[in-house]
């Protein structure tokens, strides 16, 4: 995959991994549509990119938690730059904890953004991609999608589902010109891991992540993602230890589950 001259869309691009992906794709010569709900920060990212190469970036304030929001984003990108070569469903949220304290609205909100947004975007891109015989769908899942997330049922379930959806896309459409890549990082120095305002936020999951391996910078993750896309590989795993954990999980699931319970007790239980 050569991104030079291609049109890319990145959701959740006002900061963190999304902004880093937009910068890396732009540096490779791509036109970039950045989308987020935070219009002010999003516009600054687009202005930064356009100052390097005029009229090469577009900011679209979008709520991708609904099908209509995804349609509006895709339409805006097509109206500006035409054919969308690569769509990166990066936006995500970390809300909710256990079954007793997480209400239905939270479950629905997390599933809409972390999973259904991927499905809605792919649904409205696939017709044009199949007609052209090419298209690239990327998503940000999480190491939690391969392993699990201590402390948050909503996050763990939605990220497992995001990985499963990406796998299904590759199986179903991979022989028809559609390429798929999914990102499964562990700790990354973003507002999700280190919220600027921690009031009312359950930090147990983040504490477990920080205790489990290195915390990478978004730009470093974006570089690994870019190289994986160029190579057209499926899985981006910027933390190599995640592969070790996944191997242990597959080899002896009961032992792995027992180990996760011990980790939970050590970190959450103090």
Image: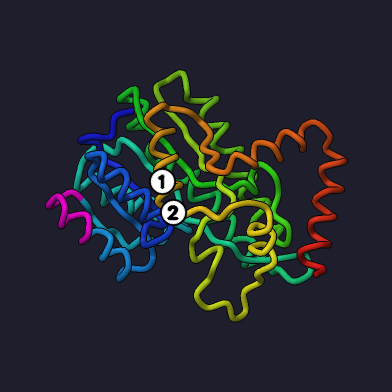
Query: Is 43 one of the magenta-colored residues?
Result: no
Foreground pick, 185 / 160: 185
Residue that label 2 marks: 218
Relative to 156, residue 96 above or below: below
Over which residues does the magenta segment extend?
47-56
Q: Residue sitting at 47 percent across and 28 percent down?
A: 233
Relative to 166, residue 186 above or below: below
Q: Residue sitting at 37 percent across and 48 percent down?
A: 21
User: Measured from the top left, where is residue 97 in percent x and y?
Assistant: 71, 65
Relative to 119, residue 200 above or below: below
Q: Residue sitting at 39 percent across and 22 percent down?
A: 177
In the displayed structure, does residue 19 sit left or right of residue 149?
Answer: left
In the displayed structure, does residue 226 sit left or right of residue 248?
Answer: left
**What is the chief secondary structure element of the magenta stretch?**
helix
Quadrant in the rendering for residue 78: top left
User: Measured from the top left, where is residue 109 in percent x and y?
Assistant: 57, 62
Quadrant in the rendering for residue 135: top left
Q: Is residue 123 visible?
A: no
* 1 and 2 marks in contact (CB < 8 Å): yes
């Amino acid at each position: 995959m050569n991104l030079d001259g291609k049109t890319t869309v990145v959701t959740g691009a006002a900061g963190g991994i999304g902004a880093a992906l937009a910068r890396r794709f732009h540096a490779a010569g791509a036109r970039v549509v950045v989308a987020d709900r935070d219009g002010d920060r999003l516009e600054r990212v687009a202005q930064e990119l356009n100052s390097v190469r005029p009229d090469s970036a577009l900011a679209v304030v979008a709520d991708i938690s609904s099908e209509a929001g995804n349609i509006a984003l895709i339409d805006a990108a097509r109206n500006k730059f035409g054919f969308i070569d690569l769509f990166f469903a990066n936006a995500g949220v970390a809300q909710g904890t256990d079954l007793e304290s997480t209400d239905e609205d939270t479950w629905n909100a997390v599933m809409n953004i972390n999973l259904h947004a991927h499905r809605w975007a792919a649904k409205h891109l696939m017709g044009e991609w199949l007609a052209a015989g090419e298209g690239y769908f990327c998503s940000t899942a999480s190491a939690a999608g391969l392993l699990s997330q201590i402390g948050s049922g909503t996050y763990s379930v939605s990220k497992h589902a995001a990985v499963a959806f990406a796998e299904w896309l590759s199986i179903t459409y991979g022989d028809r010109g559609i390429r798929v890549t999914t990102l499964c990082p562990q700790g990354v120095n973003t507002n999700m891991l280190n919220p600027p305002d921690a009031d009312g936020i359950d930090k147990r999951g983040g504490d477990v992540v920080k205790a489990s391996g290195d915390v990478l910078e978004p730009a470093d993750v974006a570089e690994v993602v870019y190289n994986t896309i160029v190579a057209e590989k499926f899985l981006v795993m910027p933390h190599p230890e995640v592969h070790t954990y996944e191997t242990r999980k597959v080899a002896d699931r009961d032992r792995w589950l027992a180990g996760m319970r011990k980790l939970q007790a050590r970190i959450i239980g103090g």
